[in-house]
Structures are given as C-alpha cells and as structure tokens.
Image (cartoon, rainbow, N blue to C red):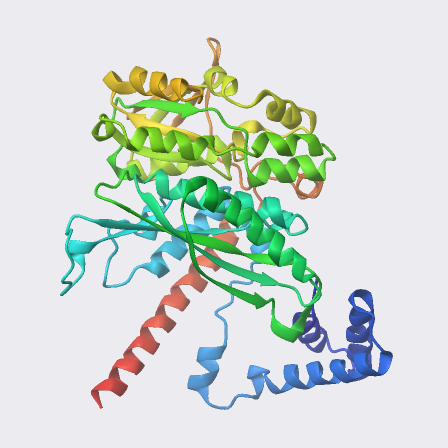
Amino acid sequence: MSDLEGLTRNLIKKGYSEQQILEKIVEEYHNFKEIDDNLAKKYAKAILEECRKSDINRVSNPFIREILDINRANVSIGKQGVGCRGSGDFFVHKLIAELSETEKRAYLSPSSLDDAGAVRLRDLQGDQLDGKDLIIVSKMEGIHSRLSDFPFICGFHVTRACLRDLYVKGAKPISIMIDVHLGDDADVGKLFDFMAGISTISELAKVPITAGSTLRIGGDMVIGNRLVGGVSAVGICNRILARRNIRNGDKILMTEGAGGGTITTTAIYSGNHHVVKETLNIKFLEACKVILNSNYINEIHAMCDVTNGGLRGDLYEINYEAKCGVTIYEQEVRKLVNPIVLELLKKVNVDYLGVSLDALLIYCSEHVSNKIISDLRENGINCSEIGYVDDSNQVKMIFTEDNQENILPRFRESAYTKIKQEIGEEMPESKEEMENKIQVAASSAIMKRNKIIEYIRIQYQN
C-alpha cells in the first residue's frame, strides 16, 4: 500500500525538487502496477499539481484556513499506541469520548467507555412511537488490520465481534451494516470473500445485512491492495446491561474463549495456521442468547467481552466506569482458555491476559451464579466463576496462595506478532509530555467545533 498523496506532501515539506518528487511517485507506481512509464509520469505530475494547489499555506482566508488546518499534537498515532488497546489508547479514547458529547445526550454514551452505545425512545423529543421503554443499541467495529490479506476470516471475525458487543448490553441484534474500503489494486474477489465472511455470521446468527458502502481507499491517491473498514450493527432491548450497574459483591463469571481476529492474526503470522480453526465458532453469541432468554436476566447486572487489551485491559476499564475493584483467580481464568490457543500464545511468548480471548464476562448476583454456569454447560459452553467485585478500585490477580498482585494495562496490548514484539509494549519515557500535547490538540478541536456551530447558527438566524 502506498499513499501517494501523503508521500508527495512529505517530500514537498522536506524540500525535494520537482524532479525528485516525480521520480519517487513513478517508482511507487511501478512497485504496484504494470504501467507504462509515460503514463506513470503523467499521473505523477497530476498528483504533484493537486498537492501543491491544495496546500493550505496558499489559503489567504483565515476562516477557511482554520477549518482546513489540523490542530496538531505532534504525537503520532503509532507512538501513542492508538488502537493498541493499552493505557496509551485508553487515554486518547477518553478524549474522543469528550469530543463525542453534545447537548443531546445518549442513554449510553461514548463517555461510558462501554462496549456499545444506546438511545432510549422515550428520551427522543416529539416522537410518536409506541414502546416507550424500547432501547436502541448500536455498535461500530473496525476490522482487524492485519487480516487484510485474508478477507473471509476478516469479515467473519469483525461481524462476530460487532454482534457480541450488542449482546453483552442485553440487546437482540436486528441489523448489520458494512463499510469497506479497498486499495486501487485490490482484486474484486477480495470484496466478495470479505462479504462471504460477514454473511456467514449473518446466516448463523439470523441477523440480516441491511445496508453498506464500498469505496476505494483515498480514491486515485492510494495504490495497493489493502482492505480496511468495519461492520456496524443495531439491536433492541428494554433494559441495558451497562458497566455502571455493577455492584459490590457481584460474582464474576467467564465463558470459555478461543479468540477471534487477534488470535487468528497471531496464528497466521507465526506460521501456526492450524490454530485458525479453533476460532471458528459462535459460542459467545449462543451463550448470550441463553442468558437473555433466561428467567434470571434481572439478576445479571452487566456483561462484557474479553476483547483487545485482554482481561488485563478490560478489567481496568470496567473498574474505571463502574467505580469498583475486582479480585480474580488466575488459575480459573487459565482453565477457560482453549488449550490449543493457550499453547500457541505460550509458544510465541504472548501474555494471554493481554489479548482478546472472545470470552464472555458476566457480573451477577451470587445466588444465580451456579444456575448460569449450569445452564451454559448444558448448552455445550464451559463457564466458571473467576472472581468477585470489591471496593478496592484495583484489579487484584491471585496467581497462587503466595503470589498475588495488582495488575494494570500496559501501554500497548500484549505484542502478539513479531513486529509488535520488536516495537515493544512498554510505556515511553515521554508519556506525560505526549499526553499534555494530545490534551491541547483535543481541547483545540472542541473550540474549533464550537466556533463552527456558532457560525452556522448565526447564518440560520439571518
């Protein structure tokens, strides 16, 4: 994949000559396309011309320039670990949640840092709809970036992950929507394979696909065969199982987990392809159905999935929102991890507590915990009690009688591929400085938003 626009702007910034820039662009075209040299030069000149004409330094109107300019943090997404499901990512997502807040509040908003969001019909102004207690739950799930070259399994896992985030909030999924972007050189068959993976889950879960969008990445400015995008879904319920409902003394149950996109990626890129088949199941979705159709649903206060960042990261985030602490028995957790998957993680030196396991966490009243475990086992789903909620505001992990410690998420999730291991997961020394810069950029974006809102409102008044 090559971002020709990004490349060109960077070379202009570095002071490269026009001839040098054109040669670099032409070289990129020849890396990806069987293309005549004259045609490559023609395209390169067009790209250079567009980049120069669109340079905001040429814009004299300060208002337009402010709209088009970026409030830069001068901290890259990669350096901050955004998307890596560690403490660096959590910090940025809390700021994104602040940017998501508007005067019209959601019933379950991004600020809750929960698995999905929700609106309640009775909170909508002037609605004439029946079923005032109905809650509409929505979720957007991005695809696993390293599965671009394996589109079927990519579509399968992103869709399953999206639906599980609805189920854990107590919602019945009713609609799946797709947004997919492919590089200019991607084979059309890649799109069909991706859709086949999505519709496999659609068929098994009995949730229809209702809408979607298919585009090229960057139009003509990006070449290569990468696939990016995501799946969104909508569900309905009458009671939301939010993290804020967790109570001191709740039992914490966990179902068996064999992982999804992350484990698949670990297996493929370490050459252990046989492990991929362990992830091909819908046990998580089936477990949720059993629970949501039970007569003890009101005794379940919250459900969550062990997703990217692993149990280490999820428990930290849940505690933050629920204002609680937890005590967890590591040996009970380990028993619930698919043994073939656990062997893989041990083999490639990955901490299983820091990666997605596709396991279900259930926070419930003590007197229904055994019944839940029994019902799930009757449906072929292993489940055990792994700990309980307390008021410590810590994640206390008991490894053995003589070995217990408070655990925290690392700066990045467990490094589950070779390149991630080379980059590392430790916190950078400049963490505080980076966070200060990012905070300023987020605050500037809010100020920019408010200024444009006021500008548009004045136009309507006039």
Is residue 385 something that shows in the picture?
A: no
Residue 313 drawn at (x, y percent): 46, 36
Q: Residue furthest top?
A: 401
Where is 457 relative to 385, above or below?
Answer: below
Closest to the observer, 185 or 94: 185
Q: Left or right of 52: which side holds 168?
A: left
Is residue 367 something that shows in the picture?
A: yes
Q: Left or right of 150: which side holds 89?
A: left
Residue 1 drawn at (x, y percent): 70, 62
Q: Residue drawn 70% across and 34% down?
A: 273
Q: Residue drawn 36% across and 47% down?
A: 116
Q: Left or right of 356: which side holds 455?
A: left
* Count of marks overlaid on the render: 0
Closest to the observer, 49 or 287: 287
Q: Residue furthest right?
A: 37
Where is 349 relative to 146, above or below?
Answer: above
Quarter containing the C terminus: bottom left
Residue 354 drawn at (x, y percent): 54, 33
Residue 51 drawn at (x, y percent): 64, 81
Q: Residue drawn 82% across and 77% down?
A: 23
Q: Residue drawn 79% across and 82% down?
A: 17
Q: Left or right of 426: which side holds 409?
A: left
